[in-house]
Structure formats: structure tokens, C-alpha cells
């Protein structure tokens, strides 16, 4: 065979960057593509909403507004205390909860007789409620029966049920940040709703009045009891104070003894004496410590006592001492210690030190005398205080007891006066029964039901339908893993896109009941005729010649042109038709390509090399006696195995008889016998079309790749994953390099334009329909 230059094929590994910008064209195509699904979702949602509106009983709502105003009671209160925003919010929240309480609901039930109102107790039920009741009825059949309740218990049960229903149908909310509470009540009848709302408002205002009156009355009774008790205790305390004064002789206006003042004076003198004694002791001990250190140390510390004693003698001696020290230092520096002047100055210095020390001893003796005097005075004052304190101890105990009794009497008197004022205020307030709430908007009779809300329900159903349809459509779009348009082939594989082959369905015929039915009966009647399935295969393999002006045939012509351009210098071109997975229609493509080449007066040989499927051999219409496997094993010459189809002007070399199995076909296809056969047929034919086994489950195509000039990859439209095809071609570089293009088979031509972007060729298939006058849809 001629030398073939392998073309390097680079596969695109990434799509265009769509992170920075939104591809509006693709988004529009996705919306158009999934519009039917979204519309169906919206229609289903609207139908469910319509069923809900039809089957749900209507409810009527009436509303009243109540103002919570503290200023309404200003005439009954002496002082108006300012309230914080937090306190106001708490009061309004408490009012809302009171309106929702069971106590108020029972009061309204009793006033309107709702326990006997069957319409209120058993209103029309929705389908959900009916289903719940049915389940409860079934459950009650298997559960033990309850003991019949008494008439009183049944009456109370109906009353409690009515209150529970009323609480569920009631709504109380604060209006914005105001002091107004909006109260709404729902019921099956409009007039009943208005009556319930009015009764609730009146019951709340009446409850406020009763609560204020009862609270004031209880406070007045309690205050009266406390006043009586406090009055008696206050009088007893005052009498106890006077009796104690008389018993203990406390006749002074201030309730004190004369010895108390004397004891205070002595205490003050003692404090002064203690301070003087401490001062004298400190001075004495300081000078005594200086004297105890000796004459030289005394001279150095004499400056401490000079100011305290105001002694000019020590000050003069220190000045003389400092002068002698300075002169002595000067003489020692000039003449040394042996000089007579230095010796005289040393003698004078010692004399001055003796005089200073003697003076300090005299001062210390004087300070000792002062210390002794101060200490004696302190001891004398202590003895006097002890004597006076001993005489006054009993009187002090009595005074403490007296003060305790006086304080108790004063506290009881103050407390009595305070309770008396509060009692008078409570008595006055009891005569002003004014509530702190009033109705500012009376409840009216509703003219239309409040639920179900038809417009809102239908609008919500449309929104939910759009969301559901959009979600499903998004999931379907995200699940797209196959090839839809030719641009996908170029962007993901980097290969040439050959074209689309339309999905051709089996022609249907009328069944026994008059309805269309596919003619696919198996097993067929054993009358010797070919089964309808084989007849359909034979028709399917001749679509290119039966419909020569169809897009199907045009795509195969484009495939021929691509093979011719890939090998322009070869007289015979071997074209291998492969696919990644079984069932993608590559055998039908191979057969139609071969038939098309034969119709173009090209000597064409179709070799069926797919031992797993053998669809290409179905063109013969009958089982051959020998095939490719028998030729390669030397059991028959190749000329006897070839069958010529005169109608298609095509020579066909089938794989083998159907009753034979060949488990090692890859070894046979890669053998030297296969090479010699291909050299032989190359000299006899213009084109050799080889139908090879799929690439993923078998390696036959890889084994036969050396004999192929060009590979034509067949991919099922929208089904074969992109990653699979790319991975197969990357793992088989020889096949990838010889692949001239990709054909998208089994394409739904009606859905194809929906996957193309605006301006893409797939969008203009209707405009080009004049060139495809005999497009096949079924055979």
C-alpha cells in the first residue's frame, strides 16, 4: 500500500470561557429548546391551582381595630408617668396575647352561643380535611370505642371545640408602630364573621373594665386591712416609748444623761494627751539613738536636732566644726598629717566633737523629762474616763433601747400615713371605671371571600410552574453530555464536522384494530420469507440511493469528498467506518456510503468486518455461504465470497455465515493474509468501505487500522458522551490521526434548530428545503 502521512490531531480540551460573560445566544437557545417543558409545567400547576380553588370552601374575614390609649384614664389618675418605648411595646404585646387567649374566646362563645351553631362547629371542609376525617374514621374502627360522655361533658366539649376553632380563625396584630391592634375573624358566613369581630372587640373592652374594677376593689380591701393593723401597731409603739422613758428616768428633752457630756470632754482631752505623749516619745527616742551611737556619730547627726530644739549652741558648734574640718583638709593636702598646724587642728576638732556630744546628752535628758510628764497626764485621763464610763454604762444601754423604740414608732407612723394616702387614691379611682382601650373601626360585613385568593393562587401557581419547569429544564440542560450541533464536534474534538444523518423510523402499518402499528413481529412465521426486521434493514441501507436529493445523501457525499481530499494521490481509497459504542448506526452509514459510491459508477467494495453486529451483510437479503473469515482462513477464494448487488452496483464481502462464531477476529484482521487480501482488492476497486466493530467494546478497528486510509467516525446525536469519544480517540492516536471527520447520526431534524445558536446554519434548514426535495422520514 502507498505510504500514508499521519495527520496530527489536537483535541480541544476546554470550552470557550463563559465565566466572565453570559452567553445570551446559548441561553436563548436553551429557553426555546425547553419552552414546551416549561409551558407544560405551568399548565399543570395552573390545573392543580384551579382544582384547589374549586374544591376549597370559601372563608369570609371581618376586621375591627382597637386603640390601646393610656390617656383615656388620665382623669382617674393624679399623675401621668412617662413610659418608655420598650414598656409600650410590652403592653401592646400583652394586649395582643390577651385577645388570643382562651378566656376571651370562651366569653365570646358564651355570648354568641357558638357551642350550638352547627355552621360554625362543622363548616364545609376542604379535600385535605375530608381525607384526614376518612383516615380518622378508619382508625376509629380498629381502636376500642370510648365510653359515651355525659350531657354536661358533651356540652363542655362543644364549648371547648368552639373556642379552639375561634382561636384558630382569629388574627390579632399591631398596626405598624402605632398603638392600634387590628383584629380579624374568619368564618364560613360573612354575617357571622362580622358578629364575631364585633363581639370580640366588645368582650376585650369589657374585660379591660372588669379587670380594672376588680383590681381596684381588691387593692382597697387589702389596704383597709393593712391600715387597721398599722394603726394599732403604731399606737402600741408610741406607748412603749413613753413607758420606757418613765421607767429609766430619761427626763432630758434629748433623752441623754449628764455624764455623757463629761465623758465626751474627757475623751477629747485624752486624744490630745495621747498625741503629745507620742510626739515626746518620738523626739526622746530619736535623740537617745543619736547619743547611743557615740560622739563622732552624734556630731554627724546633730543637724537633725538643731531645728527641733531651736538650740543656737549646737548650731554654732557645728559651724565651728565645719570650719575646722575644711582647714584641716587644706593643711593635710599641703603639708601632710605630721605638720604642727595639722595636729593643732585635729585637737581643736576633737574638742568641738566633745562639746557637741555633751550638748546632745543634755537635750536628751530634757526630752526624757517631757516624755514622762506627757505619759503621766495620759494615764490620769484614762483613769478618769474609766470611772465616768463605769457610772454611765447602764444609762447607755437604756439609751440604745430607747432609740430603737423611737425608730420603730416613727417607721410605723410613716408607713401608716403612706398606706392611708394609697387607700384614698384607690377609693377615688374605683369611682372612675374607664378602660384604656376603645374601638376605632367597627367590623363590617365582608362582601367577598378572603380565601382562597383566586388571583394570588393562580399567580403563585404560574410562578411555581415556571420555577418547576425551569428547574427541570436546567437539570436536563446540565445532563447534556452528547453532541448536538457541528460546533460541538469542532470545539470538543478538533475534527472536521461532516454533517447530519436524519433519524429514519420504521414505516407503520394498520393493525387488526385499525390503529397504526409498527411491523416488528418476532419471531416471524416460518414460511421461508425474510423477517420484516431484515426488510427494514435492507431499506435502511439504501436510503442514500432511494433518496438521492436528501440531506442524508448530501452528508455522505460530503464524507466522500473529505476522504478524497485526505488522500488525493491514491487510486483506491480504503475508508473505515467506526463508532465508539454499539447501536450508533455506523453499519447503516457504511452501507449507505458504499451504495452511494456504487451509484456514482465507482467500483466499490463493502467489507463487513464487524463480527458482532453484521448489519452490513443485511444488504444481501440472504445468508452467504462464505465470507471474510473463510477467505482469511483459506477455506474459500475471495472471489467466491464476494456477492455483487446489481441494483446498488456494489460488491459486498460479508463477514461470515451467521451460524459461525469467531472469537479472535482482531488477530485475523491484523494477519498477513488480511494484508495480501487488501493489496489484491486495491487493484480491483476504486473505493473499499470497511464496516468495523465499535472502538470501546472491541479492538478490531485498531488491529485493522494499518490497512485504512481514512476513518469516518459515526456518533449518535445527543446520546454518545463527548468525553467518551474524546477519550477513545486520544487512546487510539493512529485512528485519531486518520479520522477525516465526524458524522452525527440519528439526528432529530425537528429538534436540531433548537440546539443551534442564532445565525448558525442549523437555523436555516427550512430555507434550504428546496434543495432537499425527497427527505426520508420513514422506510
Image (tube, rainbow, N blue to C red):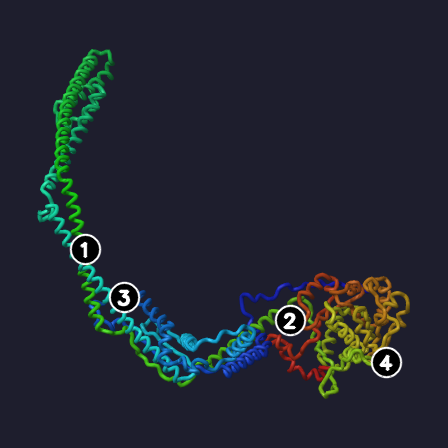
- Residue 111 % position (x, y): 35, 79
- Residue 723 % position (x, y): 66, 65
Task: Report crowding for label 3: few under 14, some 14 to 19, many 20 or more residues within 10 A (C-alpha).
Answer: few
Per the rendering, the mark at residue 411 is 1
Alpha carbon separation for disc pair 3 and 1:
31 Å
Task: Report crowding for label 1: few under 14, some 14 to 19, many 20 or more residues within 10 A (C-alpha).
Answer: few
- Residue 502 % position (x, y): 70, 78
Per the rendering, the mark at residue 401 is none
Please give left or right for residue 105 compared with residue 29 in the image.
Answer: left
Alpha carbon separation for disc pair 1 and 2:
102 Å
**Callout 4 secondary element:** loop
Q: Earlier in the sequence, mark 4 or mark 1?
A: 1
Report which residue position mark 3 lands on: 83
Per the rendering, the mark at residue 487 is 2
**Front: mark 4 or 1:** 1
Question: In the figure, residue 219 lies in which quadrant?
Answer: bottom left
Q: Quadrant of the N terminus?
A: bottom right
Alpha carbon separation for disc pair 3 and 4:
106 Å
**Front: mark 2 or 3:** 3
Per the rendering, the mark at residue 528 is 4
Foreground: 621 or 500? 621
Foreground: 310 or 559? 310
Q: Quadrant of the C terminus?
A: bottom right
Residue 212, relative to residue 444: is it above or below? above
Amino acid at each position: 500500500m502507498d505510504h500514508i502521512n499521519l495527520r496530527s490531531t489536537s483535541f480541544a480540551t476546554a470550552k470557550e470561557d463563559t465565566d466572565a460573560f453570559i452567553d445570551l445566544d446559548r441561553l436563548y437557545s436553551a429557553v426555546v429548546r425547553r419552552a414546551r417543558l416549561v409551558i407544560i409545567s405551568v399548565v399543570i400547576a395552573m390545573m392543580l391551582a384551579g382544582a384547589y380553588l374549586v374544591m376549597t370552601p370559601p372563608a369570609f374575614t371581618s376586621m375591627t381595630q382597637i386603640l390601646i390609649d393610656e390617656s383615656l384614664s388620665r382623669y382617674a389618675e393624679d399623675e401621668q408617668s412617662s413610659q418608655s418605648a420598650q414598656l409600650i411595646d410590652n403592653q401592646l404585646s400583652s394586649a395582643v396575647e390577651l385577645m388570643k387567649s382562651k378566656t376571651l374566646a370562651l366569653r365570646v362563645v358564651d355570648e354568641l352561643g357558638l357551642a350550638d351553631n352547627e355552621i360554625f362547629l362543622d363548616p364545609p371542609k376542604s379535600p385535605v380535611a375530608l381525607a384526614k376525617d376518612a383516615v380518622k374514621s378508619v382508625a376509629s374502627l380498629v381502636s376500642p370505642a370510648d365510653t359515651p360522655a355525659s350531657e354536661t361533658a358533651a356540652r363542655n366539649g362543644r364549648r371547648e371545640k368552639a373556642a379552639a376553632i375561634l382561636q384558630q380563625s382569629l388574627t390579632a396584630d399591631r398596626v405598624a408602630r402605632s398603638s392600634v391592634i387590628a383584629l380579624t375573624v374568619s368564618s364560613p358566613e360573612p354575617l357571622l364573621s362580622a358578629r364575631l369581630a364585633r363581639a370580640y372587640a366588645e368582650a376585650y373592652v369589657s374585660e379591660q373594665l372588669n379587670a380594672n374594677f376588680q383590681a381596684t376593689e381588691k387593692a382597697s380591701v387589702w389596704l383597709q386591712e393593712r391600715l387597721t393593723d398599722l394603726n394599732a401597731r403604731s399606737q402600741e409603739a408610741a406607748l412603749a416609748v413613753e413607758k420606757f422613758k418613765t421607767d429609766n428616768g430619761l427626763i432630758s428633752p434629748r433623752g441623754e444623761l449628764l455624764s455623757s457630756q463629761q465623758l465626751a470632754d474627757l475623751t477629747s482631752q485624752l486624744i490630745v494627751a495621747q498625741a503629745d505623749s507620742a510626739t515626746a516619745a518620738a523626739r526622746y527616742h530619736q535623740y537617745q539613738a543619736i547619743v547611743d551611737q557615740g560622739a563622732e556619730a552624734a556630731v554627724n547627726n546633730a543637724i537633725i536636732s538643731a531645728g527641733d530644739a531651736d538650740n543656737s549652741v549646737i548650731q554654732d558648734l557645728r559651724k565651728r566644726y565645719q570650719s575646722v574640718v575644711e582647714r584641716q583638709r587644706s593643711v593635710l593636702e599641703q603639708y601632710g598629717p605630721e605638720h604642727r598646724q595639722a595636729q593643732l587642728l585635729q585637737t581643736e576638732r576633737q574638742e568641738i566633737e566633745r562639746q557637741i556630744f555633751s550638748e546632745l546628752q543634755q537635750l536628751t535628758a530634757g526630752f526624757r523629762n517631757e516624755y514622762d510628764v506627757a505619759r503621766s497626764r495620759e494615764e490620769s485621763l484614762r483613769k478618769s474616763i474609766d470611772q465616768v464610763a463605769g457610772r454611765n454604762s447602764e444609762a447607755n444601754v437604756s439609751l440604745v433601747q430607747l432609740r430603737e423604740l423611737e425608730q420603730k414608732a416613727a417607721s410605723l407612723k410613716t408607713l401608716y400615713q403612706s398606706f392611708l394616702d394609697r387607700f384614698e387614691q384607690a377609693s377615688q379611682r374605683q369611682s372612675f371605671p374607664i378602660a384604656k382601650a376603645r374601638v376605632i373601626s367597627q367590623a363590617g360585613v365582608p362582601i367577598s371571600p378572603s380565601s382562597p385568593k383566586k388571583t394570588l393562587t393562580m399567580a403563585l401557581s404560574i410562578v411555581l410552574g415556571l420555577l418547576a419547569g425551569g428547574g427541570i429544564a436546567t437539570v436536563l440542560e446540565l445532563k447534556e453530555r452528547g453532541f448536538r450541533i457541528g460546533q460541538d464536534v469542532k470545539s470538543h474534538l478538533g475534527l472536521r464536522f461532516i454533517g447530519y444523518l436524519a433519524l429514519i423510523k420504521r414505516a407503520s402499518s394498520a393493525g387488526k384494530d385499525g390503529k397504526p402499528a409498527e411491523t416488528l413481529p418476532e419471531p416471524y412465521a416460518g414460511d421461508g420469507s425474510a423477517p420484516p426486521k431484515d426488510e427494514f434493514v435492507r431499506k435502511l441501507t439504501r436510503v442514500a440511493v432511494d433518496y438521492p436529493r436528501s440531506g442524508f445523501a448530501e452528508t455522505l457525499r460530503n464524507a466522500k469528498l473529505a476522504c478524497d481530499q485526505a488522500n488525493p494521490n491514491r487510486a483506491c481509497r480504503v475508508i473505515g467506518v467506526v463508532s465508539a459504542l454499539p447501536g450508533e448506526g455506523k453499519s447503516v452509514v457504511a452501507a449507505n456510503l458504499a451504495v452511494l459510491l456504487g451509484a456514482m459508477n465507482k467500483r466499490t467494495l463493502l467489507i463487513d468486518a464487524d463480527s458482532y453486529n453484521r448489519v452490513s451483510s443485511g444488504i444481501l437479503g440472504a445468508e452467504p455461504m462464505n465470507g471474510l473469515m473463510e477467505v482469511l482462513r483459506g477455506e474459500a477464494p475471495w472471489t467466491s465470497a464476494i456477492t455483487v448487488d446489481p441494483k446498488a452496483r456494489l460488491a459486498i464481502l460479508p463477514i461470515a455465515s451467521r451460524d459461525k462464531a469467531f472469537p479472535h477476529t482482531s488477530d485475523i484482521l491484523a494477519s498477513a493474509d488480511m494484508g495480501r487480501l487488501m493489496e489484491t482488492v486495491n487493484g480491483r476497486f476504486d473505493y473499499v468501505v470497511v464496516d468495523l466493530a465499535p472502538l470501546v467494546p472491541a479492538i478490531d478497528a485498531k488491529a485493522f487500522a494499518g490497512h485504512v486510509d481514512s476513518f469516518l467516525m459515526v456518533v449518535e446525536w445527543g446520546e454518545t458522551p463527548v468525553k467518551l469519544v474524546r477519550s477513545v480517540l486520544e487512546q487510539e492516536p493512529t485512528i485519531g490521526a486518520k479520522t477525516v471527520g465526524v458524522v452525527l447520526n440519528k439526528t432529530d431534524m425537528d429538534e436540531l434548530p433548537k440546539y443551534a445558536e442564532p445565525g448558525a446554519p442549523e437555523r436555516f434548514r427550512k430555507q434550504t428545503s428546496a434543495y432537499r426535495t425527497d427527505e426520508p422520514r420513514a422506510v
